[in-house]
Image: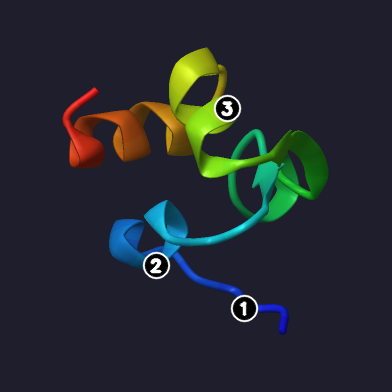
Amino acid sequence: VIVIEHHQAVMAHADWIIDLGPGAGHDGGKVVFEGTPADLVAKRSTLTGEHLAEYVGA
C-alpha cells in the first residue's frame, strides 16, 4: 500500500518513507530521503526528518 501523507503519526508507523523536496511546487520533486522512519529521525537531513524527530521526542 502506498500512502501520500503529511501526518507525523502515520509517518512514524510506516515501514518505509520516500521524502520529496527540498520544497514545494517548483522547488520540490526530488527524492531527498528514502528509508525507515527511524533512519529519517536519526539523520534529520530534511525538514520532514526534523519535524518527525520532534514528534517522536527524539
Circle 2 crowding by C-alpha within 10 Å: few under 14, some 14–19, many from 20: few
Quadrant position of the N terminus in the picture:
bottom right
Residue 39: mark in rendering: 3
Quadrant position of the C terminus in the picture:
top left
Residue 10: mark in rendering: 2
Q: Which residue is mark 1?
A: 3
Circle 1 crowding by C-alpha within 10 Å: few under 14, some 14–19, many from 20: few
Residue at the location (35% across, 39% down)?
Answer: 52
Q: How many marks?
A: 3
Instruction: Give yes or no for contact between labels 2 and 1 (Cβ–Cβ under 8 Å).
Output: yes
Residue at the location (53% across, 61% down)?
Answer: 14
Mark 2 element type: helix
Where 2 falls versus 19 (above or below)? below
Mark nearer the N terminus (2 vs 1): 1
Mark nearer the N terminus (3 vs 2): 2
Mark 3 element type: helix
